[in-house]
């Protein structure tokens, strides 16, 4: 009986701590086509709503050191990529942060998205999609200490 109680206690507190992993912080984005580092995104929460902004870029030799979002529409048109908000209006659901949008500054397209902290807070599973989650792609961002 004592073992069952201890097991239930461990499982209960383990799930509480796992559910409490916060996406707030800095995350390294990886290009899913090349596997190369692309940027560092800073994620924060304001009034229970999650946002993300590009803090720094990994610029390769020969690339523009100050790229602009020339493919973007609206208020982001021709804004510098560095400092641009690429994730906005995410609200916490049961398993995922969801309901918001993510901007791909390379092509200016805006997608629906959901995200989840995984691997004990070391990675962020970021899913961008058109319409429904099945029609999209997943990237894994790495937490920057």
Image: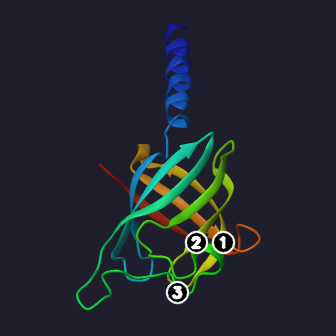
User: Which dot, 1 or 3, sits closer to the camera?
Assistant: 3
Where disc 1 sits, the SS reads strand
Q: Mark 2 points at which residue?
A: 103
Residue at left 59%, top 65%?
A: 127
Q: Mark 3 points at which residue?
A: 70
- Residue furthest out toward the left: 61
| Callout 2 touching callout 3 (CB < 8 Å) | no
- Residue furthest out toward the bottom: 62
Q: Which of marks 1 and 2 is nearer the N terminus?
A: 2
Percent of width and height locating residue 126: 54, 62
User: Which dot, 2 or 3, sits closer to the camera?
Assistant: 3
Q: How far apart are marks 2 and 3 (CA)?
A: 13 Å
Q: Is residue 137 left or right of residue 134?
A: left
Q: Badge 2, how many Cα within 10 Å: few under 14, some, many 20+?
A: many
Q: Name the residue under label 1.
A: 111
Q: Which of marks 1 and 3 is nearer the N terminus?
A: 3
User: In which quarter of the view is residue 110 placed?
Assistant: bottom right
Percent of width and height locating residue 58: 30, 74
């Amino acid at each position: 009986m004592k073992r069952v109680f201890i097991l239930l206690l461990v499982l209960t507190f383990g799930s509480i701590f796992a559910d409490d992993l916060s996406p707030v912080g800095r995350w390294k984005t990886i290009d899913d086509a090349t596997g190369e580092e692309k940027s560092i995104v800073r994620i924060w929460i304001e009034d229970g709503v999650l946002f993300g902004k590009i803090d720094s870029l990994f610029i390769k030799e020969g690339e523009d050191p100050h790229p602009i979002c020339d493919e973007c529409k609206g208020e982001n048109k021709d804004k510098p990529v560095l400092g641009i908000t690429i994730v906005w209006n995410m609200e916490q659901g049961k398993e995922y942060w969801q309901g918001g949008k993510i901007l791909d500054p390379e092509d200016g397209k805006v997608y629906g998205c959901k995200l989840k902290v995984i691997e004990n807070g070391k990675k962020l599973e970021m899913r961008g999609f058109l319409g429904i989650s099945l029609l999209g792609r997943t990237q894994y961002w790495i937490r920057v200490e």
